[in-house]
Amino acid sequence: MSLNAGVGNNLTATNNFVRSTGDDGMAINSVNYNTDGNGVKTYYTPMSHITMTHNTIIAPWGGKGIGIYGGGNQDVEFNYIADTARYIGLGAGRFGVNGNDCSPPR
């Protein structure tokens, strides 16, 4: 489950069960911009106030349990992450060359 592309604020993902994903079990992916086929960039406002609580993520084999990639004021707590095969359970930072940085709380 991914909340991404800078398309929303004040989103909530709670009480989900995610198992054996080929990428991150759950992710907040705040994209700074996308480029179309003509090289034109579309910019997005950084995502904020995303809540991920009381979720269960089991055996993500190709990514993190939960990835927080950019934006600010994210609330990620009371989640159960187990049996990550390749990466850590919880990661935070910028995703790729077109992602937003993580910003401090305001």
Image: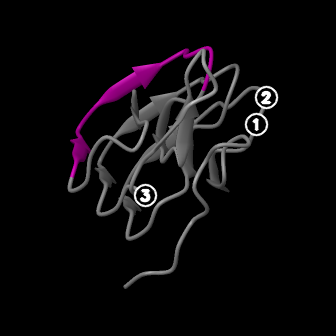
Vertical relation: 13 (above or below) 76? above
Amino acid type at circle 1 is Tyr
Amino acid type at circle 2 is Arg
For image coordinates 43% across by 58% down, the residue present is 46
Q: Secondary structure at mark 3?
A: loop
Identify the residue position indicated by label 3 in the image.
Answer: 46
- Residue 38: mark in rendering: none
| CB contact under 8 Å: marks 2 and 1 | yes
Q: How is the image coloured?
A: one colour
> How far across and down, in percent of the image, does residue 67 sit?
57, 44
Q: Answer with left or right where residue 15 lies relative to residue 106.
A: left
Q: Nearer the viewer, residue 46 or 41?
A: 41
Identify the residue position indicated by label 2 in the image.
Answer: 86
Identify the residue position indicated by label 1 in the image.
Answer: 87
Query: In which quadrant is the C terminus drawn?
Result: bottom left
**Mark pair 1, 3: CA separation:** 25 Å
> How far across and down, in percent of the image, does residue 47 sit?
38, 55
Q: Nearer the viewer, residue 26 or 43?
A: 43
- Taking the view exactly as shown, the residue that stands out farthest to the bottom is 106
